[in-house]
Image (cartoon, rainbow, N blue to C red):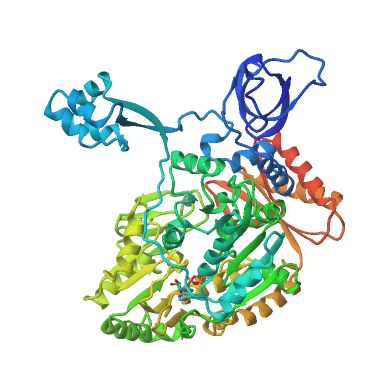
Amino acid sequence: MIASVLLEIKAKSVDKTFDYKIPENLKSSLKVGMRVLVPFGAQKLEGYCLKIKETSNGSYELKEIIEQLDQEVILNEELMTIGLFMKSITLTSLSNAYSTMLPTALKAKKNKNISKKYETFLSLNVSYDEALFLCKNEIQKEILSLLDESITIPKKEANHISVSATKTLIKNGIVKEKKEEQYRYQIGLYEKTKPKILNEEQQKAKEKILSYQNQTKTILLHGVTGSGKTEIYMQVIEQIQRENKCALILVPEISLTPQFVENFSKRFDNQIAVLHSGLSGGEKYDEWRKIMRGEVKIVIGARSAIFAPLKNIGIIIIDECHSDSYKQENNPKYHVLDIATKRSEYHNCPLILGSATPTLEVMARAEKKVFELVSLRKRVHHNPLPTCILVDKKEEVKKGNVMISAILEEKINDRLQKQEQIMILLNRRGHSTIIECSSCGYTYKCPYCDITLTYHKTSKNLRCHYCGYTKYIDHLCPECKEDALNYYGMGTEKLELTLKEKFPSARIVRMDTDTTSKKGSLERIMEGFQNHDYDILIGTQMISKGLDFPNVTLVGILNADATLNIPDFRSGEKTFALLYQASGRAGRNNLPGEVVIETFNKDNKILNFVANQDYTSFYRYEMQIRKQLKYPPYYYLAQIKIKSKEYELARAEATKVVNYLKKNLNPMTIILGPTTANMFRINNVYHFEIMLKYRFDEKLKRTLQELDQIFIMNKKVDIDIDIRY
Ligand code: ADP
Ligand code: ZN
């Protein structure tokens, strides 16, 4: 018997399968989809067993597998197909695809520091009366009192009373010990809640979704904020479970939406596994095995949970499907939506895309009836969407209201008096964004990146938000040595100080990556705000996510222009989604909500669509622009980045790449560039960019693959291809 083993060799990951003899002792235990250790030249390498066959084509003598590394299959048939699919859509290697799909503990790499966790339990070995009779002293009896004929206790509880007495009890055969595998992560236990009575829109949506049970169908659930999408998901899943099927649910970021998992565990018994980046390697490994062993019926997780080895899937849900986080930034640059579609085909089950602000690509497919569109136009509690005011910041600055506008200040005072809560979004962390010397004009810049440094007052240093470079600041200008440094621009830190001065009695809390880096701090802030320990929550885009705080009646958005000015064709769409979501935090319960948006571009169309809470007009407007400029969804985009520490080299190679593409691609494909990237220099590496706009190009994939291969040999220049940018 021969095994074909997939090995990853070289840092740039080239796929190779090699044949190995299966030794006698592994013939019955080794299965396709397990990892093995094999000799490779002078080394020992880990690889995936992809095939077991009778004979090998090679003429050379085969070596034997050294060791079988798994007792359970880790790549089942479905995951193997997904790997191949991922390779085909992202141009990554198969071994890299599998590595991406599996938790760290199960990757075929030297990684033996994550193992199963065991706990030892004690139980009675004889009847209780007999045990009592055999006990020699009071301490032994005390340990015994924890036990009962049917009760098992963790050994550490007995050890807590006395280690030596516990030892004696075991030695004398009165109690026995047993080692059991323990799962590290446990979802909190909550009191169960009953399903809510759905309103008419919700009921219709639920029925529509269920009409596609056991069919491959993608459904866009387009519902305004607060329309009760989560309740629909839960009731659909209840129905699906009656057929003994499982549900896979993706959310953008679990740590920001703990209420989501909580709601599910209040409804469903202990059948939920959770997968996200906040878990330790060991916890992820355990959750993965719970799923593989079929011990859970529901998986809730962030991006990589799309690879959860759940069997018998009856529904896949991607909540907030417009979120950036569903696209992986690093290689392989896959989008969750593509993988989810593949899995929905495999399981013959519906795929639900939930959002208040779907991307244009998704909405366009729904309009073309490729996806089924289900809309929720009303909020559950029938309260209207919040009213929005656009404030002209230019006028405010003239009046001297540099930090916040007069109207926002007035409304904050009003809410504080009514004991209602306020959220303020400022999508920029730190204190001051620019420090300039008024004497010589010097500004602090990152020595490695093309960006000005941000001042953080609490830690008294300057930081690069790209590469993490930090520098302590002196009160003198480093250039002209004058005491003339001025601080401009406002981040969340400065805003917090400003508001504390303006509203001395208000209880204010700030939520951004600086205040939430410690484990548990994020949860504490959110819980505190939920319990009304705070009146005002200040934060970056973190606070715009799916949080549901019923007592918030005012949302202020301070630098609405920031995302709008990012040079990216999606900036309009991203701004709309961010501000619409943030606005949606206001007035979710019985109290009406108000939103104040401050901007230097009061006439900007996108901001006016947000102010009117009007997705449809936004969609029509933006689609027109995309059509004119030949952007998605009218064209596909591919992005190629050429990177090098040497500027001239990067530039020359980028030009060569363009010439190569011109020769090899379909003449209808538009090739733009090379241009310098938005962030031209990051960490001292220069970036050049080439964009491809195409509709159909049968030569595209192969050409890009070849290009990728050419650069594998190049040690000085790197290529980075995103085939569906
Ligand atoms: P969305 O995700 O669409 O923004 P949510 O699912 O968070 O909305 O629902 C908003 C609020 O309404 C939640 O507190 C939820 O518990 C509640 N809710 C949802 N459906 C109903 C219903 N049918 N009856 C009463 N309350 C509901
Ligand atoms: Zn930097």
> Which residue shows up at 66% across the image and 14% down it?
24
Front residue of this view, candidates 382 and 500 = 382
Residue 625 lies, with reference to residue 481, above or below; the image says: below
Whether residue 581 sits left or right of residue 360 in the image: it is left
Residue 7's x, y, as percent? 66, 29
Q: Nearer the viewer, residue 11 or 71?
A: 71
Q: Residue at x 37, y 86 (%)?
A: 407
Res. 525 image quadrant: bottom left
Horizontal side, residue 326 vs residue 584: left or right: right
- The image position of residue 602, as x and y in percent, is 52, 84
Q: State whether residue 485 appears in this view.
A: no
Quarter in which the N terminus is drawn: top right
Which quarter of the image is occupied by the C terminus? bottom right
484 with respect to 642 (left or right)? left
Residue 460 percent location from the top left of the image: 30, 55
Residue 712 picture quarter: top right
User: Which residue corresponds to the image point at 40% horizontal and 83% vertical from the top-left?
Assistant: 590
Q: Position of residue 606 (x, y in %)?
A: 58, 79
